[in-house]
Amino acid sequence: MKAASNLEKVLTSGAFAVTGELGPPKSVDAELVRKKAQLLKGFVDAVNITDNQTAIVRVCSMAAARIVLDEGVEPVMQMTCRDRNRIALQSDILGGAALGVKNILCLSGDHQTLGNQPDAKGVYDIDSIQLVRLAVKMRDEGKLLCGEELKNTKKSPLLPPKIFVGAAANPFAPPLEFRILRLGKKVAAGADFIQTQTIFDLPKFREWLSRVVDAGLHEKVFILGGVMPVKSHKALTYMKESVAGMSIPDELIKRMEQAPDPKKEGVRICVEIVQQLRELKGLRGVHVSTVEWEEIIPEVVEGAGLLPRPTLAEESLRGSPPA
Amino acid sequence: MRFLKAISKIPYYLLLTVEFIFKKLVFRCHMCGQCVLQFTGFTCPMRCPKQLRDGPCGGTRENLHCEVYPERKCIWAMIYGRSKFLGRTRKLEVIQFTIDWRLADTSAWVNYFSGRDGQREFKRNLRRQAVAVAEKQR
């Protein structure tokens, strides 16, 4: 066990893992984070805490992760390279681990010009692959990027952060062959799990996955397919038009448009996708994300027949800092 | 003495200017001072709005254009196209060293040959690793 996190235990046990996603609020509404965490408790193995997603200012992911942890749900702290240089990133990995965070997800981050502070300076000191390698180096070698050991003083013991390191992959953005190559680089950098971009276009995803399997990458890393229940056809059309790197078939939009109850239809489509994903070779779990609709995740997980989730002692969740 | 010291820097700045003009025209260089052109199909990755040096982000559009600047082609799509054309796609598999920002606005040519950017050592290590992997497979 690298980090002994709940997510790692579920994945290594061979069970089909489920992760959720929780967006921190745009105000100091800690109660909302608690409420959302309670909604997800028992329905997911871990929950991603987004890091100022789409470059919009929110409660920072480390703080929200600690609140979620207090509710007895395991967080996956997302970290983007957009806002922090290597000093802050390493410091946040240490800080997160000290607060009991056991999973992190390394991302490049949405570009700052696409958010609500388009005049901000983007950092991008290192990229997501270098961040994966840095985090793995901290965990396995107990060293910082510069080679310095993770010791407080010369005589104090070596205390590296025990973290399960994840990365993202987008199966839908072109060029496809390069995507496989880049996934291989993330695996070579030491990523433990991969969460993919939201899947609406199953044939395209199958092609990507078959190439991943051909390259033998599915044996070296746990791959979780991303899914998302949507409320209306407008959301789908919006994503198709303005979110780059998304592939949404027209039939799906038509189906949502014609449905008498679009919300129910959205959940049904999502459940269908999860059920088809479960059949695929090389996929070890799903990642259910939503846009401010966390309360629907339990319904999706239940509908897909992924309950009950493998349980662990409450104690192991209440992330105690490393001894 | 101060005058001599100032004069002694002239050749360096002349070279820097030549390098800057040449690379700006040919590669639209950003003067990071540590060229990775030989890994990236002779296309400068610093033109990427996120300055990614290890491959494209997830925001490449269907028409291979950039997420941030829709009118521009994704630089990494260009790098992949050119690497494929030149038969250099294996070079893209290398995980790049992190940028040393102290070298920004200095001469990458001088940095390469003086070993200041650590790139020759980086390549030596890569070769050593490749040999070790090949031996292990045997």
Image (tube, rainbow, N blue to C red):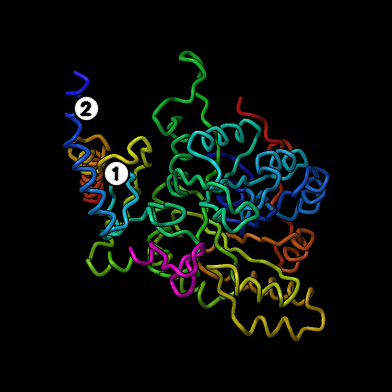
Please tell me which residue is depicted at 43% across the width and 71% down the height of the picture.
Answer: B64
Q: Which residue is farthest front?
A: B3
On screen, residue A278 versus residue A132, left or right, reads right
Say which mark, if any, is on residue B34. 1
Please say if A88 is above or below A116. Answer: above
Which residue is the site of mark 2?
Answer: B6
Instruction: Give SS at disc 2.
Output: helix
Q: Position of residue B127 (x, y in %)?
A: 21, 45
Task: Check the residue under mark 2 and report the chain it is in.
Answer: B
Instruction: Give SS at disc 1.
Output: loop
Circle 1 crowding by C-alpha within 10 Å: few under 14, some 14–19, many from 20: many
Q: Position of residue A315 (x, y in %)?
A: 72, 36
On screen, residue A260 versus residue A250, left or right, reads right
Residue numbers of the magenta segment: B60-79
Please tell me which residue is depicted at 63% across the width and 59% down the height of the picture.
Answer: A287
Residue type of the residue flagged with mark 2: Ala
Please tell me which residue is depicted at 54% across the width and 63% down the height of the picture.
Answer: A283
- Residue A282 visible from this viewpoint: no
Please tell me which residue is depicted at 44% across the width and 44% down the height of the picture.
Answer: A126
For the C terminus of chain A, the quadrant is top right
The mark lying in front, picked from 1 and 2, is 2
Specify the principal SS of the magenta part: loop
Q: CA distance from mark 1 to mark 2?
A: 25 Å
- The residue nearer to you, when weighing A312 against A65, is A65
> In the picture, residue A175 is in which quadrant?
bottom left
* Circles 1 and 2 in contact, beta carbons < 8 Å: no
